[in-house]
Image (tube, rainbow, N blue to C red):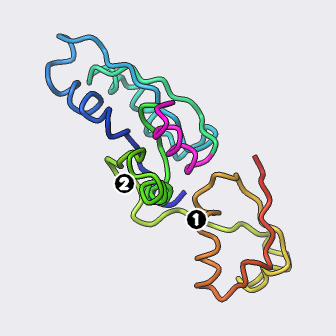
Amino acid sequence: MPHESPLVPRHRAHRTLASPVAAPAVAQARTRLKFVLNWRYQGLQGLFFLAEDRGFWREEGLEVAMDQGEGSAAAVTKVATSAYDLGFGDINATVALAATRPAEAPFDVMMLYNRPPFCLAVRADGPIRTAKDLEGRTLGGPANDGALRLFPASARLAGIDASKVTIVNMQ
């Protein structure tokens, strides 16, 4: 989940960003938005649910329907294909999409993490003590996860041969 960011398709930015500000919320119909999260419902998405619970969306003239996602990179594609209006996705996936299909790429309107909260969880009493100990092992995570997409680069920086690490989809 590197640099999670809410995404807006370029062709909808004027509607989603300008409309709520153009007139007081009481004087206009609510703008309906479909919002895809980066993964299953979890704590780091709490700010979005807090906004809903406290009526912040409504105060801004928004009616937001939130759905759980299938990985932070998948949120980018879902916004780019107009399946969703907004997404909590991965900046690296946005850059990759913009490089390969610039006309379809959404743009990011806000960064939530300066440093992504990546971690590799292992048992304290297990055999993995250093990054090099990952070689010959299997890592699991969601297929569309930004952190796993960056694993080859991270492995290179850590001196690990990424081809010696098996990645398993754990959706």
Q: CA distance from mark 1 to mark 2?
A: 16 Å
Residue 132 percent coordinates (x, y): 74, 86
Question: Which residue is located at x 78 percent, y 51 percent?
Answer: 170
Q: Is residue 36 magenta?
A: no
Look at the picture and state if 108 lies above or below 128: above
Q: Are marks 1 and 2 in contact (CB under 8 Å)?
A: no
Q: Mark 2, residues whose alpha carbon is within 10 Å: few (<14), some, or many (≥20)?
A: some
| Label of residue 107 in the image | none
* Residue linked to disc 1: 118
- Label disc, if present, on residue 111 of the rendered structure: 2
Q: Which quarter of the rendering shows the N terminus?
A: bottom right
- Taking 165 as reference, is 106 left or right? left
* Residue 56, quarter of the rendered image: top left
* SS at circle 2: loop
Residue furthest bottom in the image:
159
Q: Nearer the viewer, residue 156 or 68?
A: 156
Mark 1 secondary-structure assignment: loop
- For the image, the number of numbered tags is 2
Residue 102 place in picture, x, y as percent: 39, 52
Name the N-terminal-most of marks 1 and 2. Answer: 2
Up/down of 57 relative to 111, above or below: above
The one of 113 and 103 positioned closer to us in this rendering: 103
- Give the magenta part as a residue range: 71-83
Could you say which is closer to the camera, residue 101 or residue 30?
Answer: 101
Lateral position of residue 5 relative to residue 120, left or right: left
The residue type indicated by label 2 comes to: Met
Percent of width and height locating residue 64:
42, 24
* Dominant SS type (magenta): helix
Identify the residue shown where x is 79% and y is 74%: 165
